[in-house]
Amino acid sequence: MSHSAHLLRSRCQHRGLRLRLLLLACALGLLHPARDALAQTAPPESALTLQAAETRLREASRDLQRARRDVERAQAATGSAAARPNATLSIDTTDINPRRGIGAGPVWDKQVDTTVRLEQTFERGGKRELRMARADALLDAARADQADALRQQLRTLRVAYFDLKLAEDKLTLLQQTLGLLDDTVARAEVRVKAGDLAPSDLERIRLDRLRAESDLRVAETVQRRAQAELARLLALEGMAGRLHAADPWPRPVVPVTAVAAAELPADRPDLRAAQSRLQAAQQGRSLAESLRTRDITVGVQYEHFPPDGRAMYGFGVSIPLFNGYDYRGEVDSAYAELGAAEDDRLRVAAEADAELKLRRAELDVQAARAARYLDTVLPTARRSAEATEFAFRHGAVGVIDVLDARRTLRAIESEALDAQADLARARAELAAALNSDF
């Protein structure tokens, strides 16, 4: 064996021994772990807490404003339902003879027959009370719809808020990765000049930096999209670019409410809305049936006919005859609406129960996943990457090894962020299912 080959073999064995010692030291915790890539920093002035975002949503959401308008319309409908039939006043003048004329003198002495009649319809069968009860039930349904719109908007807001936080943290992670690669490129250039590193290895580092820079541009686009979505929900489109999520990630612990609540909450607004619409349909059925109860119209009249000047009075009562139509269509339609309302109530209850079970299971899974990443996977990956970086700085490993270690660490850190974001979404979904705070 030549002297140069023997020297190369000795150097490789020496590097392998150093690498094994470094990895062993890392495993025993003798090396300090790398600092958290997403260290806590003071939030900027434009940072937005989740609580502040929820307050803004309640005040400025366009979707909630539309729900408030629906409540106002339902309130107006209660006034219409409580109205009684208006009286009818009619004045008729007859016996006008063009040949004979209407006579001389004042208007009251003209030789014409003038009748003044007043008629009033009296509803029977409790129609007014049934209309009022139906309108009140629909008003309760509209108010429950408003509460349900808030429930759903809060869920959407919380998901959008943590989507923005995920985009920001991933952008920060890529910025730090790019900064580390810039430093590595600078160090590699010095080593290439000193003959301690091959130029091909420097090109590999530069290529990895270009990839990280491309990923950074994509992350910036994702962040802007998340800012725009959050701004849309809060009606703050003009300051979308200044929105930043200030709250920390939720800890991977299942909330007490998720464990304690065994049944679907009775005050969930979509259930209340469905129940109120069922009550409205029941009142509507009774109202349709009451149409077959005949209303009575009572009329009184005064008749004046000169020249004798005698005043004559009259009285009349009118009752509709159902000889052609007995409101069968209205009654059948009301029964169909009642059946549909009952079906809808059962459907909403079944979907809400299934949703609650799904959200509970999903939260358990996501909490366990986030805890596993934060407590085990991520610390192990950081220790391994720290050992490889230390070995690279001391010449024990090559460029390919350290680049692979960095890619692996960046992928695991990104997966850990995804796990935390999935946990936050699962908590938001469960809070919506329970109609509770986040």
Image (cartoon, rainbow, N blue to C red):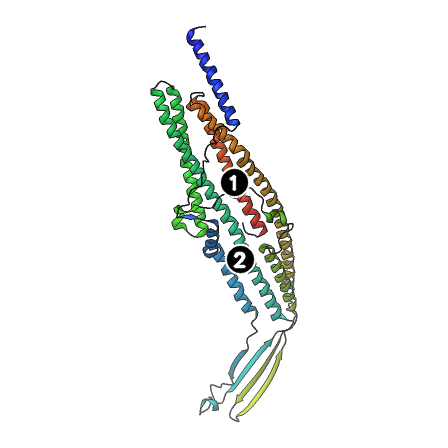
Residue nearer the viewer, 428 or 132 = 428
Single out the residue that lies furthest toward the top.
Answer: 1
Q: What kind of element bears circle 2?
A: helix
Q: Is residue 418 left or right of residue 211?
A: right
Residue that appears at 52% across and 93% down:
309
Work out whether mark 2 precedes mark 1 in sequence or the reverse, and give the earlier one. 2
Amino acid carrying mark 2 in the image = Gln
In this rendering, the answer to whether 332 lies above or below 25 is below
In the image, which disc is placed on residue 362?
none
Q: Residues within 10 Å of mark 1 (few under 14, many from 20)?
A: many
Residue 95 position within the rendered picture, expressed as x and y whole percent measured from the top left: 51, 85
Single out the residue that lies furthest toward the front.
Answer: 30
Q: Is residue 283 left or right of residue 104?
A: right
Cα distance between the residues tagged 2 and 1: 31 Å
Amino acid carrying mark 1 in the image = Gln
Mark 1 lies on residue:
420
Residue nearer the viewer, 152 or 382 = 382
Mark 2 lies on residue:
146
Residue nearer the viewer, 18 or 311 = 18
Quadrant assignment for the N terminus: top left
In this rendering, the answer to whether 160 lies above or below 304 is above
